[in-house]
Each structure stands twice: as structure tokens, then as C-alpha cells.
Image (cartoon, rainbow, N blue to C red):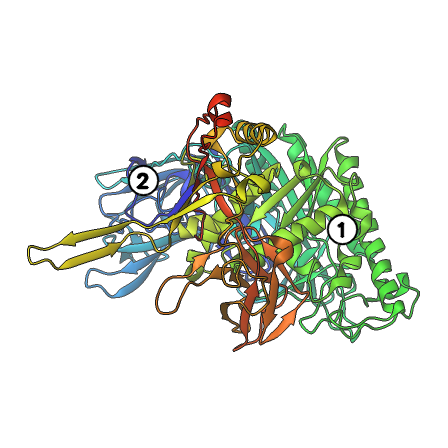
Amino acid sequence: MAYRLAEAGDRLVTTHVKRFDARFWTVDFARPMMAAVVTTAPDALRVDAVFYQADDLAGLIWEAEDRHDHPLLAYDTDRDFRGCRLSFRWRSDGIRALDAINGPTLTIEGRDATGNPRAWYVRLWNYAAGDPDDAVITLDFDALDGGFLLPGEADRVWAGDIDRMFVSLIAPGYTGVAMPLAAPAEGWVELSAIACDGPRSVLAIGDAMVPAHGLRIATGYDDCYHLTPARVMRMILALGYRGIINHYVGMSHYFRLERVGDAWQAGLDGGALNRPAAAWHEGFAALCHELDYRLILSLSYELFDAHAPEGWKQRAADGAPALTGWVPPSTLLSPASPAAMAYLQAVARAFVAIAVAAGLEPIFQIGEPWWWLMPDGRPCLYDAAARAAFGGDPPEIASVRGPLSTAEIALLDQAGALLATSTAALRDAAWAEAPGCTVALLVYLPTVLDAAAPELRRANVPTGWASPAYDILQLEDYDWVTEGRAGATARGIAAATVRLGYPVAEQHYFAGFILNREAAPLWTRIEDVAAAGRARGSAETFVWALPQVARDGFTHFETGETAVQAFDDVSFPIAIGARATVEPGFSTAVVTSAGGHEQRNADWASARLRFDAGPGVRSEADIGTLIGFFRARMGAARGFRFRDPFDDSSSGMTGAPGPFDQHLGMGDGARTRFALAKRYGAGDVPARAITRPVALSVRIAVGGIERLTGWTVEPGGAIEFESPPAAGAAVTAGYRFDVPVRFAEDRLEIARTSWAAGEAVSVPLIEIREAGA
């Protein structure tokens, strides 16, 4: 496995598309309205919109610069539209008509011929032939005028430096005033027979096709609502992702709104999904079916706070609602609220129905269901419905990160049982819509398996989730990944596996999440944990998520080589190896000048060891043991542990290890991972990396005090602390260790006659360089 972060200009293969290709239009709008654009033919698109306020306006947008596609797939930036002639058929309903005041207008943003920023407002009706809701529109960018009445108000467009243009869409009841409409208004526009002619009507576009690989991709509607499904699927296919897509339906764009008092709130009046979201997902599901992808539709307990009914929200004991850190925030729905849970069940059924209608195998994910935790450790178990479910007056937990009373622990158990009941009901809703629907449960490990709050798992990883309650257990841990806490990942997955009982073959793993472009170097960690997930045997390993992949140019590919050399974590027979001979070796280039001066260059930072285990062979039983071990390792193909009889301890060479033997580093209050190392002598000689410690021999001290708990030995010879050592605290360690080796040859020659005559057997071994060594 390997990856690169592609940049603009890296692409090697291009093709061409016409400007205004239907796939590359976008939509955008201000809340609370919703809109979506889908392609209906290679030269056609449809925009669906729902308006709630009298000032709601959506834009159908074409941008000169492709800001949304992966760098290997983007179209070229060309701001010069001179010589272009765009035509299309316009049909609409529920949208203010072409001939009306404030009717559909093409706003063009750019600069005039002198370079000054300008905007032009082109009334489409002035260039239309037909009816106000069914017309052919032709726009010649060399003869295009803004203004309402032509020619009297003509404002000639200079098309040589345009950034973007958008067609404004408003409801018939638009007034421009921020007041609610009498009722939500749905409308649509179709552009068909889209054609662009002229000398600048063609754009170069990336045409990369990464070979199919073993990673899967995740998407989220809240991040790609403005793109066409065809554009999203083009990226997925071209970047080598195959098989199955995990699609989070989001928490802020799918819902219908209804007026309750002075607010717009999510509700089921008219159905579970707004028409734009339904249209987008219908198009997306149809493309998945056409391109032979399986689709997981994911729904969480999270909802955009501004539109969540107050009675649905989880709350802390003081009544504060559970709010996430997003801006603006989302909230968590209470598993105890019958209305909130009935709402989620209706939404689940609506999305499952879309998958079935598209001919897909229905797969539904219950995403990250949990009781929210305030930053100070207060659990949100105290909304009115939860209080009633817990007996009316449950004990108030000040923080789950401190000691808890028997009553408080019992409350967490009650909360877990209630959470399990709510997810089971959501599962059953999916089954009711599509009998036999595969149902997955997604658990976010850093929150629900917080080492500082061990009892919290009673509430957030309830045993009611245990196998076979769900078909698939999905696990994600992106905070641990981006923090470099691979040990926490290993512990969390192991803990979830033990607690819930799903074998690894029934697990999916989600690797990473890069929130900001500035954190792009963290893709290395995501690639590493993705490789570990696949090596662990997870049924599927996903990269989260496509918008970040496109933004940073993440490009995964298979190298055709084994990422990790085959290694059997077993020891060479100790009795035979105890009499081995050892040869430390370096690689040093020495150049001697004519005057006798030397220039020396050390190619290796530490010695590479060679052993001969032959002297330990003392009997025919030893020969039998040796041959069996050799055959099990397939000769030189597989590595194994070997105990160096002359150097196997952090204390001197063979002394008993103590917790203060070797200095690993200084705490900084954030770092939790320290690699084991051994130093030989003083000065600038590099330390030797210890990758195969004897786990039960390891002793650790922090700040001069031995620690017996709070840390684990991770693969590769690293110590992972559950909480970071304090700034300025020295971390030290003692241990015994083995050397990773392999047989030096694929042949093992042992003759009974020569051995019986006293000739020494030769069993050459050579040290393996492991990652970090």
C-alpha cells in the first residue's frame, strides 16, 4: 500500500469536456431553504428546491475554477468566456417565471476590461424564445447585456475575466423580506439540450484512472449536497474505490421543516425527507446500482440544533442541551424521547426505501448513537423523557471521569439499556421497510471508550449491542489516529471486540478524518491505520471521507509489494540458541587519499547482527527441533525472534532490567507514545531501536517513579500511555528483548555422519531491519 497527495499540475492524463457540462454545475443557498442538482442526461440537469422564507434564494452555479474535484480530475481554470455561446431549454414549475420582476437572473461575477471587480445581472427572459416556464435561452458572451429592460438599461458584459456565474431561483411568493412563507413551497427547474459552442467552449480536464484497490470510501451528504451525484461518483470511480460506499446522510440537509411558533423545526409533515434531498439520493443510488457499487446509508442521532425541537434534545442536569463543536452546532437526540426516536425511524425507512427502489441491496447503518458528554465530564442523561425513564429523579453525575457511587453506576447501566432499546427499534424500522436489510452499528471509540471514564461504556457501549444483534460492527477512531495514538486504537478495537463479541470478519474499520487542509501531513497516519485494519482482517476498511480526499489530493494505490515482511512472533528454540555465536557488523565506506588521509562514511546507524546457532545443536533431538522450526518458517521466507546470548537486556548486556535503565524521552503533557531504545556508550551514537521486547519483562518509570499500570507495550516496541506524562517528566524503561531475524539461506545442510564425527553444524541467521530500527 502507498499514497501520495496530488497537487494541481500533477495530472498526467487529460481529456476534454464542453464548458457548462451538466455534471459540473453546483447549487448553494442560505438556510433554511434546501436545493439539490442532479443530472438527468449527459446534456441535462434538474434543480429541486424548497423555500420556507420570503427571502429564500438558491443559485445554480458555474465556476471558472474547479474547487471541488480531486486535483487529478479537475477541469482547467479558464476565466475567459469570450467566443462562447451557451444555449439550453428551460422548463420550470414552482419557481418565479422568466418574465416576472426578479425572475431568473444570471449574475456574472468577475472583472471589467480594466481589471476592476464587477458584477452584471443578465435577465434570462431577454434572451429567451418561448413561454415564461418553457423556453429556449441563448447566451452569446460576446454580445451579452445586463439590465432589466433592453436596450434602454443595457450594461454590456465583458466576458474576458469571469470568476463565476449563477442563475438565481426564488419562489413565486418571494418578497425579499425575512419572513416565513404561508407554507413551504417546492419548485424545480430543468435545463436540457445544454450546448456550448465557440472557440473557447472546450476545457481540458483530468482523466486519471487509479487502479482498483482494497480501500473503500465514505461520503457525507452535508459535505457534497451542492455537487451532482454524477460528479461525486466520477471521483469515487476514478480514484480506484470499488465495492461498497458508506454514505452518511448527514444531520443538516435532509429534513423537512414545519413552522412551530417562531421557528422552523424538523418534522414529518408531508414525509420524512425534503424533496431536494430525496431527489439527490435517488440519483446517487441509481448511479451506485448502474456502476455496481453497494451502498451503506448511514443515519446518526445528530441533528442540526437550530431545527431540532427542544423536547428531542439530550440535556445535562442543569438543562443545557448537548451541543457539538461544529459552527453552527448540532445536537444529539435523546434515546428516551418517543417523538425523536419515531422521527429517526421514519427517516431510516425513507432512505432504505430509496435504496430498494434503485435496485440496491438495502444496507443501513446506525451511526454513532451515544449519550453526549459535556467537556467537563457531565453526561447528558437528564432531558425530561430520560428523567422519566430513569424513575423521575436520577442521581446527578458531576463527572464520569471521577469516582462514581453505586447509584450513579446503576444509572449508567439504565442509560445503556435504554440506548440499546432505541437502536434496536431503529434496526427494526429498517427491517420493516426491507425485510432482510443488513444493519450495521457504528461506534466512535475515543468517546465511548475513554480511558479516563471507564464506567461510561456502560451507557455508550451497552451489552445489548452484543452479537448477533447487528450484522456488522463498524468502528472508527479518527481522534486517536490524528493524535498518533496507535496503541489506543489497538486497545479500543480489542475492548470493543471483547465486549460486543463481533469477530473481526464482521467488523468494518473507518480510518481517519482530516478536518483542515493544514493537517494534510496526517494522511500518513491514516494510510498506516488503514493498512493495519486490512491486515487485521476487517471485512472492509474505509477512508473517511471523500471531500477531504478531494481537497488534499489523497491518492491511494497498491504497490504490489507486501507492506510488512512476513514475521512469526515465535522464538527460536532457546536451548539451541543459547550457544550461538554472534557477529555485529557495520557498513562503512572508507576512502583513502594519496596522502594517506581517510574519509569514512557510516551507511548504517547501528550494527546489523549475524548469528550462527549451529554450536547449540548437541543431540539428534536438537536436530529434529531445528529442522521442524526451519520448515515452519519456510526457510528464509519468515522472520522470528532470537535471543542474543550476549546482549538481551536494557541493563548492561545481560543484567536484570530495572525501570530506570534507558531514557526514552521527556513528557510534554500531550505525547503518549515512546519508542523503546537502547544506548551503547555516550556521545552522538544513535540509539538502537528495540522492536521485539519481551512484554512481561518491561518496567516503566515516569519522573523517577515506577508505574505498574496506565501503559501498554504496543507492536513495534513502543510504550503507549493511557494519559500523557507531565511536561518535564523523564520517561525511562527496562526490559529484556529479542532480535528479529530470519534464516540467512533457504537451505539447511545437516549430515548425520559429519555431525556424529564432531563437525560443527552451521545455522546462519541474519537480523531483520524492522520499521523504526
**Label 2 vs 1, first from the N-terminus:** 2
Q: Is residue 377 above or below residue 613?
A: below
Q: Nearer the viewer, residue 541 or 158?
A: 541
Residue drawn 44% across the image and 53% down it: 772
Q: Secondary structure at mark 1?
A: helix
Residue pictured at 26% horizontal, 43% vertical: 84
- Would you call the spot at circle 1 few (<14 residues within 10 Å), some (14-19), or many (20 or more)? some
Q: Dot 2, how many residues are within 10 Å of its Cα: few (below 14), some (14-19), or many (20+)?
A: many
In the image, farthest residue toward the bottom = 728
Compared with residue 95, is residue 43 higher up or lower down, i.e. above or below? Answer: above
Residue 125, how many percent across, how many down?
A: 40, 48
Closer to the camera in the image, 327 or 637: 637
Q: Nearer the viewer, mark 2 or mark 1?
A: 2
Q: Which mark is residue 343?
A: 1
On the image, the x and y values in percent for residue 738 come to 53, 49
Outermost residue on the left side: it is 594
Left or right, residue 681 beside residue 371: left
Residue 29 visible in image: yes
Q: Is residue 24 above or below residue 761?
A: below
Q: Amino acid at mark 2?
A: Ile
Residue indicated by mark 2: 205
Give the amino acid at mark 1.
Tyr
Q: CA distance from mark 2 to mark 1?
A: 43 Å
